[in-house]
Amino acid sequence: YLRHIKRVWSGLVRGNRDAMSRIDTATVQALQMRAPRASTTDAKILQSQLRAGEIFSAFDDSEREDIWSKLSMVEGLIPSLHTFFMDVLYLENCVNCVKRLTTLSARQSLS
């Protein structure tokens, strides 16, 4: 999952480390949990913010257009550390439910 996060975000800027360092917190917060390829609403919102320079504000217009071409092709939700920890919490709750449904002896485990 963490590799997927890195792959998506670095892919937006063609793996350019300098460009990656210019991605700000506001951009990450605006993109996480959005699915511009699957949701026309998300696509319209993000494209509007991108063109207005509200996200990827440290990039020029041509760079933002290049980013949009990649961003609009991301499969599923745009991942972030926030989505990672939300997924971990969700899975932890599932594990706790399974634990309540099963009775194990002291020598057994769920793994």
Image: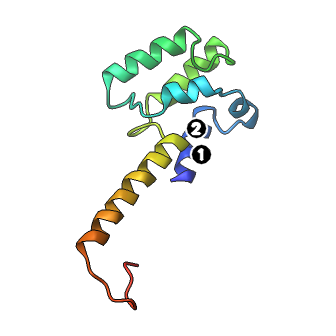
Which residue is at a point 58% across and 33% down the rendered structure image? 12
Give left or right: position of 17 versus 24: right
Residue at the location (63% across, 20% down)?
63
Residue 40: image quadrant is top left
* Three-letter amino acid code of the residue under disc 1: Lys
**Callout count:** 2
Could you say whether the residue bearing mark 1 is in a helix, strand or loop?
helix
Whether tag 2 and tag 1 are in contact, CB under 8 A, the answer is yes
Q: Nearer the viewer, residue 73 or 85?
A: 85
Q: Decide: is 92 above or below 20.
A: below
89 on left or right of 16 = left
Q: Which mark is residue 9?
A: 2
Q: Quadrant of residue 95?
A: bottom left
The kind of residue tagged 2 is Trp
Compared to residue 67, the image places residue 77 above or below, namely below
Q: Quadrant of residue 6?
A: top right
Residue 61 location in percent, x, y? Answer: 62, 12
The spot of residue 107 in percent (x, y) is 40, 91
Give the structural element (helix, strand or loop) at label 2.
helix
- Residue matched to label 1: 6
Tell me the CA gap for discs 2 and 1. 5 Å
Residue 109, above or below 91: below
- Asked whether, in this view, residue 58 is left or right of residue 90, the answer is right
| Residue 80 in view in this figure | no
Task: Give the residue at x 50% y 24%.
Answer: 30
The quarter of the picture where the C terminus appears is: bottom left
